[in-house]
């Protein structure tokens, strides 16, 4: 995972609430067996019409979105399916941060596993970002603070371990593998539920 | 004396490999990992890249369901034909991965193949008090047995394959209590659609829900699975129902259920699982289920639901409701009843079990699907299919003019060729009415099997109570 300690970029604003992962990447793109190249499928049904032409009114198709890598999204962003492809598509498109008043649980977990920073801001601060599309925003992951375009700052919550992984690039699997002895000790006890066993 | 604990807390505590510290989350052990073709290939790739094995293949079970055909056309060699070459490659990779890493796979064509959340319970691999994960958000279905079961992303699929563990923050708890007796024609699907319409699609966000109350106690296991299945649509981490005699009667004798002395020992453990009297939840809400009507969704998320006899609601200045109405092509104030439909889909991990098919058949028996409607009945598993055929349900569906298919997710997620065409309206027993969910440009009304079957006959949204005796 590429470490991300501090990220400064322009925002693109998509304030719709309850944007589900079927919109972020429609299911027909999920027959892939790799993580690569999913940016082309990002918001496919909102970005392109039935003939495959870009819809000029969709925000990601506007010139202002070209170099924006912070997405300001609405409440409950990423609800629905657990598909991690949604995070892969956002990152392949170039996003490194999503700011919203709240995220769906599974999406947030998936984001953290990949180095996409999910920033939760209170509604009033979020509204200020929604009102200033294209503004330059800095997300200080190490300090867990957003530097707002009007000069103010806003702290955001991120679990210490998640912050450590984001800022150092360590992934959780490395950490879990380092706990081999602890896991083996748990397995040595009588199991809560035994392994699969077909009994005639 | 120890503090009273909730069902969730008992299961959580029993699976703590290591508790949380100020710096690190808890490490939780996973008893059962269910795997399917769509969310696993990149996880197996990760294992190969790092030279890792599957830590506990005997705690892992795989099937194919999402991208697989439900018509079972055969190719020149007599193999089941998967027309989409990418989907075929995905299915082939799961077969290779399971063979290489020693995982039991109920592959396409196997008599145990089916939707992962249908086959787990029916094979008896879903045990009360166990921890279950799958790279699929509807894993919460298994919570009906008092398991702690939730969906994970592909990175975490890799973590569980390699270590049988997950790093978890402890979720909050929420008790949802239903009182009263469901009226005739009102089902578990209406109960959960009613709940989500009330609390919203993020109403249970961050929480594990325990469904309680006399209404829930009276539900069959299949109905409890329908209820728990859509917990994710309220944003919940998962839903759970405490095990009771209904749970035990369902599990006893199933292939992977314990037998003999092991069964007795398991039952003793499972009886200690229900929440203790006085156990505290972070939130508690209660609902009167006796007043509930059959529900239907009008919009583009599962929280946008109304009683079937209601009118399309006003958007009241809410941008997402206005957008949903535009997408659905509906006007505020229109009656939901009588909205024309093109397709009726009866299936999915929400409503594809034998009792769901019986409910649909009870409406379709001796009736005809309307001329303008295409009706698909897709059993949740090969076993459900065989049971339904043994009862003659397939004949009921075929004689009514519906298509009787092989097991899979089918038009719930529309990855396998079973899809709506742009602009079509479907009444669907599945779980998501998101834009394009059932096919690009398709429009979904979520409802129960009874309502779906009644609408198939009417050719438009219909009240099932006019069709059931």
Image (tube, coloured by chain):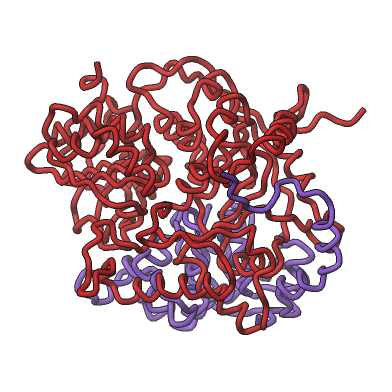
Image-based side of B202 in relation to B303, left or right: right
Residue depicted at x 31% and y 35%? B357
Whether B347 is drawn above or below B247: the answer is below
In terms of image quadrants, where is residue B17?
bottom right
Vertical relation: B203 (above or below) B421: above
Task: Answer above or below: position of B422 versus A116.
Answer: above
Residue ID at (66%, 49%) = B131
Visible residue check, residue B123:
yes
Quadrant that contains the N terminus of chain B: top right
Q: Residue furthest left?
A: B371
* Residue B336 placement (x, y as % from top left): 24, 32
Residue situated in front as seen by the camera: B132 or B63: B63
Q: Position of residue A104 (x, y in %)?
A: 56, 54
Q: Which chain is purple?
A: A
Q: In this orientation, which residue lies closer to the viewer: B379 or B151?
A: B379
Image coordinates of residue B105 in percent, x first then y, are 49, 62
Image spot of residue B301 (x, y percent): 39, 46
Residue at the far right in the pictured view = B1
Q: Residue at x 56, y 54 (%)?
A: B151
Nearest to the observer: residue B438 or residue B47: B47
**Does residue B109 appear left or right of residue B19 in this picture?**
left
Quarter holding the C terminus of chain B is top left
- Display colour for chain B: red
Above or below: residue B6 compared with residue A78: above
Q: Specify whether residue A134 is in view.
A: no
């Amino acid at each position: 995972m590429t470490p991300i300690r501090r990220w400064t970029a322009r925002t693109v604003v998509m304030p719709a609430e309850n944007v589900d992962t079927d919109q972020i990447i429609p299911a027909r793109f999920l027959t892939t067996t790799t993580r690569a190249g999913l940016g082309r499928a990002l918001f496919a049904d909102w970005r392109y019409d039935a003939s495959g032409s870009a819809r000029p009114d969709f925000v990601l198709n506007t010139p202002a979105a070209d170099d924006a890598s912070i997405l300001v999204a609405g409440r409950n962003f990423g609800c629905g399916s657990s598909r991690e492809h949604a995070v892969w598509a956002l990152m392949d498109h170039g996003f490194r941060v999503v700011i919203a008043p709240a995220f769906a649980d599974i999406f947030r977990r998936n984001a953290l596993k990949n180095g996409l920073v999910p920033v939760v801001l209170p509604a009033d601060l979020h509204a200020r970002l929604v009102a200033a599309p294209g503004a330059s925003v800095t997300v200080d992951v190490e300090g867990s603070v957003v530097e707002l375009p009007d000069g103010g700052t806003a702290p955001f919550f991120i679990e210490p371990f998640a912050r450590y992984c984001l800022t150092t690039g360590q992934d959780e699997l490395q950490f879990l593998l380092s706990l081999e002895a602890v896991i083996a000790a748990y397995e040595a006890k009588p199991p809560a539920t035994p392994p699969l066993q077909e009994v005639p | 004396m120890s503090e009273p604990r909730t069902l969730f807390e008992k299961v959580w505590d029993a699976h703590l490999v290591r508790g949380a510290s100020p710096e690190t989350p808890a490490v939780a052990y996973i008893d059962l990992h269910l795997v399917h073709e769509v969310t696993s290939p990149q996880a197996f790739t990760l294992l190969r890249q790092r030279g890792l094995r599957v830590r506990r293949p005997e705690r892992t079970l795989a099937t194919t369901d999402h991208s697989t055909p439900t018509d079972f056309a055969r190719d020149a060699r007599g193999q089941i034909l998967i027309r989409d070459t990418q989907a075929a490659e995905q299915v082939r990779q799961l077969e290779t991965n399971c063979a290489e890493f020693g995982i039991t796979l109920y592959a396409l064509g196997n008599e145990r193949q089916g939707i992962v959340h249908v086959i787990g319970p029916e094979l008896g691999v879903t045990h009360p008090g166990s921890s279950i994960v799958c790279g699929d958000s509807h894993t919460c279905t298994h919570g009906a047995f008092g398991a702690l079961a939730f969906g994970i992303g592909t990175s975490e699929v890799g973590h569980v394959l390699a270590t049988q563990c997950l790093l978890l923050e402890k979720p909050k708890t929420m008790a949802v209590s239903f009182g009263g007796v469901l009226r005739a024609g009102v089902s578990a699907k209406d109960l959960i659609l009613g709940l989500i319409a009330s609390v919203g699609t993020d109403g249970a966000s961050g929480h594990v829900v325990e469904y309680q109350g006399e209404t829930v106690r009276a539900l069959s296991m299949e109905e409890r699975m329908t209820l728990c299945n859509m917990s994710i649509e309220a944003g919940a981490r998962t839903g759970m129902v405490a095990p009771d005699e209904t749970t035990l009667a369902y599990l006893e004798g199933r292939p992977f259920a314990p037998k003999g002395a092991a069964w007795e020992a398991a039952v003793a453990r499972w009886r200690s699982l229900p929440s203790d009297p006085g156990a505290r939840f972070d939130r508690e809400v209660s609902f009167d289920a006796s007043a509930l009507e059959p529900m239907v969704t009008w919009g583009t998320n599962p929280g946008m639901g109304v009683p079937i006899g209601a009118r399309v609601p006003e958007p009241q200045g809410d941008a997402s409701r206005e957008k949903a109405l535009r997408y659905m092509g509906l006007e505020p104030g229109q009656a939901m009843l009588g909205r024309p439909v093109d397709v009726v889909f009866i299936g999915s991990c929400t409503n594809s079990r034998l009792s769901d098919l019986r409910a649909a058949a009870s409406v379709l028996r001796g009736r005809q699907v309307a001329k303008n409607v295409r009706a698909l009945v897709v059993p949740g598993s090969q076993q459900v299919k065989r049971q339904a055929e043994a009862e003659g349900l397939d004949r009921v569906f075929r004689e009514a003019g519906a298509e009787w298919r092989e097991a899979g997710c089918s038009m719930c997620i529309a990855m396998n060729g079973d899809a709506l065409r742009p602009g079509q309206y479907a009444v669907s027993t599945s779980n998501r009415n998101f834009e394009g969910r059932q096919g690009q440009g398709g429009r979904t009304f979520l409802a129960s099997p009874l309502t779906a079957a009644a609408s198939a006959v009417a050719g438009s949204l219909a009240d099932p109570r006019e069709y059931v005796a």
